[in-house]
Amino acid sequence: MTAQLQTFDLDPTLGAPVLDNAAWESLNGVHSRFAIRIGQAARYQPEVAGFVAIADGTDEKSWHDLAQLIGPGATVHLSGDDLRPPVGWTSAVGGQGVQLINVSLDTRVDPEAVELGAADVPEILDLVARTKPGPFAPRTIELGRYLGIRSEGKLVALAGERLQPPGWTEISAVCTDPDFRGRGLATRLVRSVAAGIIARGDRALLHAVSTNSNAIRLYESIGFRARRVNTFSAFTSPS
């Protein structure tokens, strides 16, 4: 854990083991229709999302299957604290993220939140490009339900559903137009997205870049609890 993360009150007992490899569990469950898979390695269709995952970071077969999946000399990013690639792979440590789960969020349906669809993708991509909440591909909206708030017809805030390991749904793409920040729009959308998640019997989780302490404090203040730190590393397959 880095010095920046020492102030976070992590509780690894929260949640469930499926959250330790959320992308893999999602690709092999609810999102299997979006998966490109070879054995113990899988990835989302590129136009849907950029996540790549393997079943077991300590298993040589998983790495062999991943090499077959991505091809020689290709670089992918994986999340995990115990990733042991075989000889021939090269790696570089990337950033860290904090995984938070809902423990006491006051969920509520927001009357101003509108459900977004394919026709809204150009506006979504523009807002994401300007606010940088994380990657968003042209078909990411197909992963779950996305809600937005508009002002005079313009999309000014966004949040939706991404990874879905069994029993859980990740709230993602939480962002607000810079001209509309400080009005609580993101919090309202998180509450509303979470309301839909809970209504269908799932629990809500979030991920935030570890250096984004403001976002993490906000999520904790409204009822999320930091569970673990995820390390993201870049791995290049043998040529």
Image (cartoon, rainbow, N blue to C red):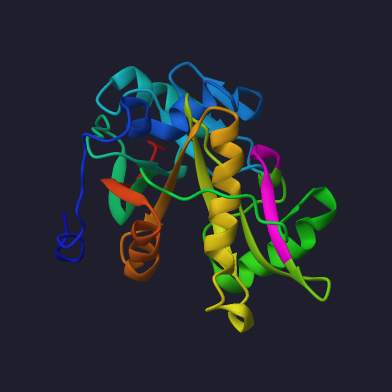
Q: In the displayed structure, would residue 114 be above or below residue 161?
A: below
Q: In this orientation, which residue lies closer to the viewer: 65 or 15?
A: 15
Q: Is residue 209 above or below residue 65?
A: below
Residue 67 visible to the viewer = no
Is residue 95 left or right of 190 when viewed as pictured?
left
Which residue appears at 85% of the width and 53% of the height?
119
Residue 130 colored in magenta in the image: no
The residue at the point 31 percent across, 38 percent down is: 89
Say which of 22 and 62 sits in front. Answer: 22
Point out residue 10 in the picture as x, y percentages from the top left corner. 21, 48
In the foreground, 18 or 88: 18
Single out the residue that lies furthest toward the bottom: 179
Image quadrant where one finds the N terminus: bottom left
Image height check: is 215 above or below 162?
below
Q: Where 15 sits versus 114, above or below?
A: above
The C terminus lies in which quarter of the figure?
top left
Residue at horizontal 69%, vertical 46%?
141
Q: Which residue range is magenta in the image?
A: 142-149
Question: Residue 114 in the image: x percent, y percent?
Answer: 75, 55
Q: Quadrant of residue 189?
A: bottom right
Q: Is residue 83 left or right of residue 189?
A: left
Residue 232 on image: x %, y % = 33, 49
In the shown orientation, is residue 63 left or right of residue 204? left
Number of disc labels = 0
Question: Residue 234 versus residue 105: which sits nearer the camera?
Answer: 105
Is any part of residue 58 visible from this angle? Answer: yes
How far across and how far down the image is residue 121, in percent?
Answer: 77, 56
